[in-house]
Structures are given as structure tokens and as C-alpha cells.
Image (cartoon, helix red, strand yellow):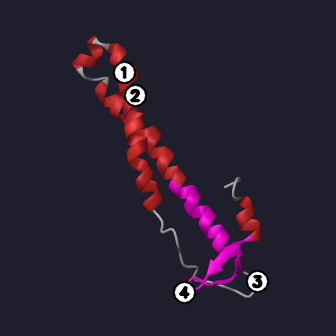
Amino acid sequence: MVVRSEEADNGIRVFDSNGNAVGVSKAAGSKAIKETALSRAALFGTTAAVPTLLLALLKRAEFVKRNPMIIAPVRHISTAIIFGLMIPVSFSLFPHFGKVTHISADS
């Protein structure tokens, strides 16, 4: 949110249904920043949580108890796989073009 705070302060360009620019909206900028932050939180939160949960389950397995050196490669590989799978999910959480329902004269 810090990186994109300028969009909330100055607003972003908004377009009508035909793609013609109609002005700048602070409400649209704030909405875009919130959606971006939520999608990034979902991406990185899931990428951090799932491998940790997977390893908690694997540490109970007899194979892992006999070979504890397997934990590091499993952690790294599962992190890479989850991150790769979550990228398209995080991009598709919100539409690339949204609607701002409330537009006032100063937005």
C-alpha cells in the first residue's frame, strides 16, 4: 500500500464502458490499492502457510523421522510449487477492470 499511495492521493484515470477517458478518481485509486494489497496478501500468505503446514504433517511420518535431511528440500520445492500455483490465483481474485459504484463530484 505504501508503494502505491500516490494513486490514492492523486487518483487514477477512469474510463467509460467504451474505453474513453472520463477523468481521474481518488475512489477508484483507493479501491485499486486495496484489491492489489489483498491479492498480494493472499499470494504471500498462502505461499508461507501451506509449506509450513505440509512440513508439520510430514514431520510425523516415520520416513522423515529416519531422514531429517529431507525436510529442507521438501520445504523449498513445496514453496516454489505453491508460489507458482498461487500467482494465477492472486491475479484472478479481482477483475483487471472494475466498477466504482459511488462517484461524487470531488472523486
How far apart, in angstroms, are the residues tagged by discs 4 and 3? 23 Å
Residue at numbered disc 2: 75
Q: How many numbered marks have been drawn onto this rendered protein structure?
A: 4
Task: Please provide percent x and percent y for residue 41.
Answer: 53, 50
Mark 1 and mark 2 in contact (Cβ < 8 Å)? Answer: yes
- Left or right of 33 on screen, residue 90: left
Q: Secondary structure at mark 1?
A: helix
Above or below for 17 versus 44 = below
Comparing marks 4 and 2, which lies closer to the viewer? 4
How far apart, in angstroms, are the residues tagged by discs 2 and 3? 50 Å
Residue at numbered disc 3: 106
Earlier-in-chain disc, 1 versus 3: 1
Earlier-in-chain disc, 2 versus 3: 2
- Left or right of 54 on screen, residue 106: right
Kind of residue at badge 1: Ile
Task: Please provide percent x and percent y for residue 68.
Answer: 34, 14
State the quadrant of the C terminus: bottom right
Residue in the picture at 29% in, 13% down = 67
Badge 3 density bin: few <14, some 14–19, many ≥20, Cα 10 Å: few
- Indicate the quadrant where residue 93 lies: bottom left
Q: Which mark is residue 71?
A: 1
How far apart, in angstroms, are the residues tagged by discs 4 and 1? 54 Å
Q: Which mark is residue 79?
A: none
Above or below for 107 versus 94 = below
Q: Secondary structure at mark 2?
A: helix
Mark 3 and mark 2 in contact (Cβ < 8 Å)? Answer: no
Q: Which residues are magenta?
A: 11-39
State the residue in front, 23 or 58. 23
How far apart, in angstroms, are the residues tagged by discs 1 and 3? 56 Å
Q: Which mark is residue 18?
A: 4
How far apart, in angstroms, are the residues tagged by discs 4 and 2? 48 Å
